[in-house]
Image (spheres, grey):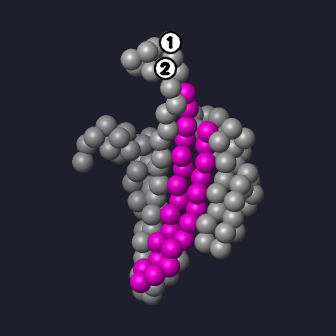
Amino acid sequence: MFTDPQSVTISGSAKSLPRISSDVNESAYSNDDSSVTERVSHSYGKRTRRTFRITHSKYAADPLFPSQNTPYSMTFYVVADVPKVGYTVAEQKAVIDGFVAQLNATSGALITKWLGGEN
C-alpha cells in the first residue's frame, strides 16, 4: 500500500493528497478541495494492468463569457500492461524508467512536442 498521504508538486506548489478510499485493488488520494486526485488500480486477467492516474481541476475564465469562471479538468494516466509471466518487476521497472527518462530528457521537450500535437 502506498504511503498516506501522497504528495505531488504542480507548477512548484506541493499538494498533499490524503487517502480518501481504499479497496483490494484500488486506492484514491485527494487534496482538501478535490482539485487534485490520484487513483491507483490493478486489474488481473490474462494480462496484468496497473494504472496510475492524476486528475487536476480548476476554474478559469469562460472564453465566451470572460467575466464568468467555468470549471475545467484534465486527466493524465499511465498504464503498465504486462503478461502474467515473462517479466520480472525489475525488468518492468527498467522499461518504464527508460520511457520516463526519454519523456523528461531536455527539460521535457518530447512531452511539450507531444502535447502540441506532434507524433
User: Helix or strand or loop: what does disc 2 sit on?
Assistant: strand
Q: Residue at x 42, y 80 (%)?
A: 47
Residue 42 placed where, x, y %? Answer: 54, 71
User: Is 91 placed left or right of 113 in the picture?
Assistant: right
Residue 27's place in the image compared with 29, above or below, is below
Instruction: Please report contact status of discs 2 and 1: CB closer than 8 Å, yes or no.
Output: yes
Report the magenta stretch's main SS. Answer: strand
Q: Amino acid at mark 2?
A: Ala
Q: Is residue 1 visible?
A: yes
Magenta highlight range: 35-59
List the residue tagged with mark 2.
61
Q: Residue at x 40, y 51 (%)?
A: 103
Residue 117's place in the image compared with 77, above or below, is above
Residue 63 placed where, x, y %? Answer: 40, 19
Q: How far apart are the alpha carbons under marks 2 and 1?
A: 7 Å
Residue 24 falls in which quadrant of the image? bottom right
65 inside magenta stretch: no
List the residue tagged with mark 1.
67
**Extreme residue toward the top, this view:** 67
Residue 11's place in the image compared with 17, above or below, is above
56 inside magenta stretch: yes
